[in-house]
Amino acid sequence: MEKPVWRVRSSQYVIDSPHMRLRMDEVELPNGTIVPDYYVRESHGFVMMFALTTARQVVLVRQYRYGNDSVGIELPAGSIDPGEDPLVCAQRELAEETGYTAPRWERILVRAAEPVRSNAQVNAFVAFDAERTSDQQLDDTEHIDVELASIDDVLAMIRDGRMSSLSSVAVGYAALDYLGALTTSATAR
């Protein structure tokens, strides 16, 4: 497919805050149709970490999410600051949210998080030999409990919906595949 050309006729920011940057574009589609209010959420992207302790336990966070007013189990994650290297962000966010640090990191993917209405990309990492080295340093809007789970338990959480955030599910599956756990689990059934 040849990429269609959407011509931007005008653009303005309707929200520009530390928590969200939302742009409203008026675009002309290739067939001449004018869309007066196409919204795009801008972001520097985010990181998500699948951190393994030396005992092969996965570091998880149970946290409150205001958007859907729920508490859920997720992989640690965080927003990339302007100009920040994704790996540096991942290391910082893991330490801040969980108190864990790790000596070895592997980037396993960079993907569009939600390309219909956002330019954000997720940078996912596996961290090896993570250990608790400090207390959490949470932002005012973060309410997080740290939990450890086996790789098999994480796979079960993904499959049965206890881990329901789509980004955690996708990165969880990618990390398990990267580690060979999906193949091991499938042959163990």
Image (cartoon, helix red, strand yellow):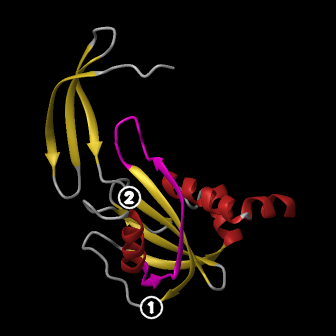
Q: Secondary structure at mark 2?
A: strand
The 10 Å Cα crowd at callout 1, few under 14, some 14 to 19, many 20 or more, is few
Q: Which residue is mark 1?
A: 133
What residue appears at the point 16 percent right and 54 percent down from the top-left corner?
17
User: How far apart, in angstroms, are the residues tagged by discs 2 and 1?
Assistant: 23 Å
Residue 165 visible in the picture: no
What residue appears at the point 14 percent right and 40 percent down from the top-left corner?
14
Q: Which label sits on residue 46?
A: 2
The 10 Å Cα crowd at callout 2, few under 14, some 14 to 19, many 20 or more, is many
Q: Secondary structure at mark 1?
A: loop
Q: Nearer the viewer, residue 103 or 101?
A: 103
Q: Is residue 12 magenta?
A: no
Residue 24 visible in the picture: yes
Q: Which label sits on residue 173?
A: none
Residue 45's place in the image compared with 7, above or below, is below
The spot of residue 135 in percent (x, y) is 38, 89
Residue 92's place in the image compared with 37, above or below, is below
Q: Tell me which corner region of the image, top left, top right, bottom left or bottom right, holds residue 81.
A: bottom left
